[in-house]
Image (cartoon, rainbow, N blue to C red):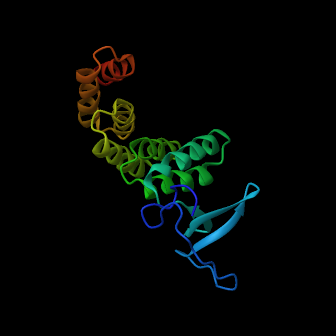
Amino acid sequence: VLGDSMEPEFVERDIIIIEPEGLATDGSYVLAWLDDEHIFRQLVKRGDRWLLHPLNPRYADAHFHLAVNLDRLGRAADARAAYLEAIRCDPRHAAAQNNLGLLSAREGRSEEAIAFFRAALLSAPNFTQARISLGIVLARLGRNEEAAEHFRAVLRLQPGSLAARSALQRLEA
């Protein structure tokens, strides 16, 4: 094993034996050919997609950045899968939870968006962008007092937040 991507199960310089005739199934450890090199990962099935999963939670950011780029390319389903993989690697990845909330909100899945924003806030209570996004979705659902509480919380953390101030003013108008 080279590198730390499969820690803590496998550490650098561990020797592994690969069964070339073995059947690869969900959860199997595999040696794959990717980007002109061999890569040792866990094979994971997510819906109809197969992913090469590093065990080391520090690798969540790689999935997160891939998801951001896929989202920018308009590949929402692939972005969702990569955000979920980032969260699988690191269940407290607040940015991935927040971005899944934004993606869900864009798709009109408000309750799902709320759940992702709340998860982001459990992971990072002072994450003002997640709090603003949660407030916006709540306001769209007519849950104005709940939304206002989130905008006020942002203003306590960042008194100069124009986004929170203008959203709160729209609610109070």
Q: How many marks?
A: 0
Which residue is most to the right? 36
Which quarter of the rendered picture does the C terminus lie within? top left
Pinpoint residue 3: horizontal percent, then vertical percent.
Answer: 55, 55
Q: Nearer the viewer, residue 76 or 146?
A: 76
Which residue is drawn at the image coordinates 58% and 59% (left, top)? 2
Residue 169, percent across and down? Answer: 31, 18
Q: Please tell me whether residue 167 is drawn above or below residue 98 in the rendered image.
A: above
Q: Specify whether 138 is left or right of 71.
A: left
Residue in view at x 40 percent, y 47 percent: 93
Task: Give the quarter of the image for residue 166.
Answer: top left
x then y, percent, for residue 123: 31, 45
Judging depth in this view, the residue of 164 and 20 nearest the camera is 20
Q: Which of 39/151 is in front?
A: 39
**Residue 145 placement, left or right of 70:** left
- Which residue is farthest top? 160
Q: Position of residue 14 (x, y in %)?
A: 52, 67
Q: Is residue 123 left or right of residue 40?
A: left
Along the horizontal axis of the image, is 61 left or right of 134?
right
Q: Residue at x 49, y 55 (%)?
A: 84
Quadrant of residue 71 in the image?
top right
Residue at the spot 60% in from the left edge and 65% down from the top edge: 40
On screen, residue 9 above or below 122: below
Q: Quadrant of the N terminus?
A: bottom right
Q: On the image, which quarter does residue 81 sit in? A: bottom right
